[in-house]
């Protein structure tokens, strides 16, 4: 019989998490709010194409269950938290459109962490794991 600590360590092991890496930057909510609706749509479609490509390359199947996700945003300039969350709206909608997640409501998605990491190269690293 496993202890609580062993179960927690097993559930947090990296082999349970499926990861995709998107070579695109996260725009701040302030920047996205100033975009024309057609530019927002174009941004979402760019994200969708990159997500679809990574899912095929990594052999990730379409979501059918509730998932926990973590998002690590590698940014050249740090933003305040509401700008990051608002800037990720198009990205999370694209995750849903490409079936990396079933839907972005609380019944199907649990966002465990959104983190900014200062880096010279902008990218988005997303990990998902089935909720038990």
Image: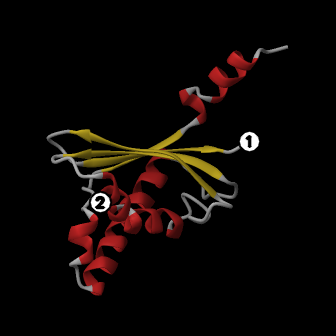
Q: Is residue 48 visible?
A: no
Residue 83, numbered label:
2
Locate the N terminus and report the quarter of the image it occupies: top right
Secondary structure state at the residue bearing disc 1: loop
In the picture, measured across the screen, residue 18 lies left or right of residue 106, that is: left
Q: Position of residue 67 (x, y in %)?
A: 62, 50
Label 2 and label 1: CA atoms lie apart by 31 Å
| Tag nearer the camera, 2 or 1 | 2
**What residue lies at 27% left-to-right and 57% top-to-bottom?**
26
**Label total for image:** 2
* Direction from residue 33 to residue 90 in the image, left or right: right
User: Dot 1, how many residues are within 10 Å of its Cα: few (below 14), some (14-19), or many (20+)?
Assistant: few
Q: Quadrant of residue 39?
A: bottom left
Q: Where 30 sits versus 42, above or below?
A: above
Residue plotted at (28% across, 86% down)? 38
Quarter of the rendering occupied by the C terminus: top right
Question: In the drawing, what numbered circle is on residue 124?
Answer: none
**Residue displayed at 19% across by 39% down:** 119
As drawn, the residue found furthest toward the right would be 1
- Dividing the picture into quadrants, the one containing residue 48 is bottom left
Quick check: 101 above or below 7?
Answer: below
Toward the viewer: 119 or 116?
A: 116
Lower sequence index among marks 2 and 1: 2
The secondary structure type at the circle numbered 2 is: helix
Asked whether the residues under the numbered discs 2 and 1 touch, taking CB atoms below 8 Å apart as contact, a structural biologist would say no
Residue tagged 1: 132
- Name the foreground residue: 4 vs 64: 4
Q: Can residue 13 be seen?
A: yes
């Amino acid at each position: 019989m496993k202890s609580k600590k062993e179960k927690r360590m097993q559930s947090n092991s990296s082999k349970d998490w499926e990861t995709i890496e998107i070579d695109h930057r996260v725009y701040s909510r302030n920047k996205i709010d100033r975009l024309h609706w057609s530019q927002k749509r174009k941004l979402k479609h760019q994200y969708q194409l990159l997500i679809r490509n990574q899912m095929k390359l990594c052999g990730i199947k379409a979501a059918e269950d509730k998932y926990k996700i973590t998002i690590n945003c590698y940014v050249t300039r740090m933003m305040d938290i509401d700008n990051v969350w608002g800037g990720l709206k198009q990205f999370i909608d694209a995750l849903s459109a490409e079936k990396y997640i079933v839907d972005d409501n609380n019944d199907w998605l649990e966002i465990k962490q959104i983190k900014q990491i200062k880096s010279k190269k902008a990218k988005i690293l997303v990990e998902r794991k089935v909720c038990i």
